[in-house]
Amino acid sequence: MKQLVRSLLLIVLLAWIGPSSAGAAREITVAAASDLSFAFKEITALFEQTTGTHVKLSLGSSGNFFSQIQNGAPYDLYFSADSRYPHKLVESGHAVASSLYIYAVGRIVLWVPTLSALQIEQRGLEVLLDPTVKKIAIANPKHAPYGRAAVAAMERALLYDRAKDRLVLGENVSQAAQFVESGAADIGIIALSLALAPPMQAAGRYKEIPAEAHPPLVQGAALLAGASHPVEAQAFLSFLQSTEGRAIMTRYGFVVPDKR
């Protein structure tokens, strides 16, 4: 009888401890805006090496992820390029209010292939009106914050009405960058964080668009209410705010707020 009780207690204990303590690594699922592509690949690799927790990283447009999460998509963390999305998720009960924070402010740039004759350094946004420019790549402004920033910058420069018919819309800002890199577009307005990535620096050149030319790209994150591994997910949030995480984000051109 005593042996049976001990066996039952052991089964209960192992079930309570969970697979990570029994030797299987935990995995967290992260939905992140595509401007974070290169930065987060470095950060997740370092986090995995440091903690042993695996990160399943999904990259896309902030608006699409917002809709997916509202419809029950099983992510642990959400990193948006627009802080209003995670705020709305908190309001609807889909995210944890105490976890909400601003992790970065992004920038946009004009980007062209290395061999392009377009003088982006000298002409700035005005180069979009060059007669050789047939297609301009931006992220879809309907659900991508970087696309909305691109439209705002063109409107402020009084260029949008003359350029809108040549716009090619990427599903997200990474796809917009791919359009230019592949030759499907002549020029693009993309994230500085992508332009600073080694492959993009090797393939092209960029010109920063002044921050005052568009509303600030304030980027917010939150732990989701239905997170399967909230402890490990919170550890990732903390890691992003560590010295190592902040250094990587800064290297990719993000303005990183002071630690909260």
Image (spheres, helix red, strand yellow):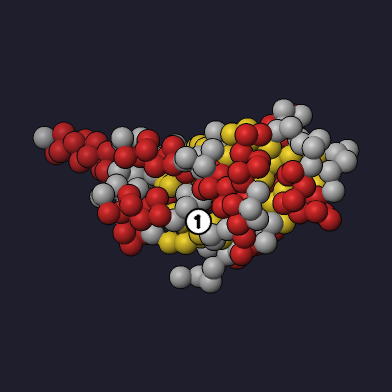
Neighbour class for label 1 at 10 Å: few (<14), some, many (≥20)?
Answer: many
Q: Is residue 45 visible?
A: no
Name the residue at 84% across, 56% down. 122
Specify whether 4 is left or right of 180.
Answer: left
Q: Is residue 2 left or right of residue 69?
A: left
Q: Measuring 44% from the left and 37% from the top, which residue is drawn there?
A: 64
Q: Amino acid at mark 1?
A: Gln
Kindly tell me whether residue 169 is visible in this rendering: yes
Residue 195: percent from the left, percent from the top?
72, 47
- Give how far across and how far down residue 239 sits, in percent: 52, 58
* SS of the residue under disc 1: strand
Residue 180 sits in quarter: top right
Q: In this figure, which residue is indicated by the disc labeled 1?
A: 219
> Could you say which is closer to the camera, residue 185 or residue 93?
185
- The residue sitting at 61% across, 64% down in the picture is 212
The N terminus sits in image quarter = top left
Is 214 placed above or below 26 here?
below
- Quadrant hosting residue 98: bottom left
Q: Position of residue 113 (x, y in %)?
A: 81, 39
When the figure is inspected, residue 98 is found, relative to residue 109, above or below; the finding is below
Q: In the image, is residue 173 above or below residue 219?
A: above
* Along the viewing direction, whichever of 225 and 195 lies nearer the viewer: 195
